[in-house]
Image (tube, grey):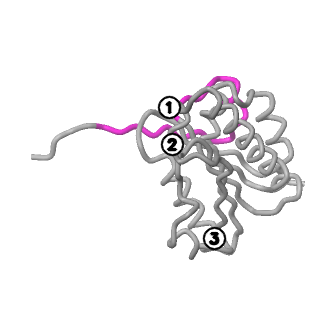
Amino acid sequence: MKKGTIHIYTGEGRGKSPAALGRAVQAAAFGASVVIIQFLKGKGLDDNEFVRRLEPEIKFFRFERSDENFDELSPEKKEEEILNIRNGINYARKVLSTEECSLLILDEVLALVEKGILSAQDLKNILDQRGETDVIMTGAILTDEVRVLADEVSKIDTLGFEIS
């Protein structure tokens, strides 16, 4: 059985999530089903009329309850959100193990590893469930432990320059 490929969009620049969303639209246009799980995105895209029109081909999920930036939450709220994030991680595991979609996007999952919410080993264990499902992961910081899990890594940089 062929294994799905793992793609990572990383770098300090803006555009990682839009690049992943572009791949989702491209995949859906060719008949694939897509699940996008967003982490640490504040309000994210889940409650948006345009996004709802993309269903059922592209389904968005966000398990966090707070619309605030995770780093600005009180320690108690962070603990609550970590429980919600873990629900999202468990859902990702279920999506992969049941092959519910052709493409799974884990938006900002690399930040979960960076913040210690998810270990690189736990991420590897989740990805090992993928069967033929392709996976895209995004995040600014890419550790060597996570880099080795990928079939393809794209680094996104934002270049600042003036147009005259």
- Whether label 3 touches label 2, CB < 8 Å: no
Task: Judge whether residue 141 is colored magenta.
Answer: yes
Question: Spatial distance from mark 2 to mark 1, Cα to Cα?
Answer: 7 Å
Q: Nearer the viewer, residue 25 or 46?
A: 46
Question: Which mark, by number, is residue 72?
Answer: 1
Q: Earlier in the sequence, mark 3 or mark 2?
A: 3
Residue 19: x and y in percent read 50, 53
Verify whether residue 121 appears in magenta: no
Q: Amino acid at mark 1?
A: Glu
User: Position of 146 compared to 122: left or right?
Assistant: left
Locate residue 54: give its quadrant.
Answer: bottom right
Given the image, on which type of amino acid does mark 2 rest?
Glu
Q: Which tag is nearer the camera, tag 3 or tag 2? A: 2
Disc on res. 28 = 3
Is 124 placed above or below 133 here?
above
What residue is rendered at 60% in x and 33% in y?
A: 111
Q: Amino acid at mark 3?
A: Ala
- Quadrant housing the N terminus: bottom right
The residue carrying mark 2 is 68
Dominant secondary structure of the magenta stretch? loop
Q: Residue at x 55, y 29 (%)?
A: 141
Marks counted in the figure total 3
Q: Report crowding for label 2: few under 14, some 14 to 19, many 20 or more residues within 10 A (C-alpha).
A: few
Q: Which residues are magenta?
A: 140-159
Residues at badges 1 and 3 in contact (C-beta under 8 Å)? no
Residue 15 against residue 27 in the figure, above or below: above
Q: CA distance from mark 1 to mark 3?
A: 35 Å
- Name the residue located 62 percent from the left edge and 50 percent from the top edge: 38
> Quick check: marks 2 and 1 in contact, CB under 8 Å?
yes
Percent of width and height locating residue 105: 65, 52
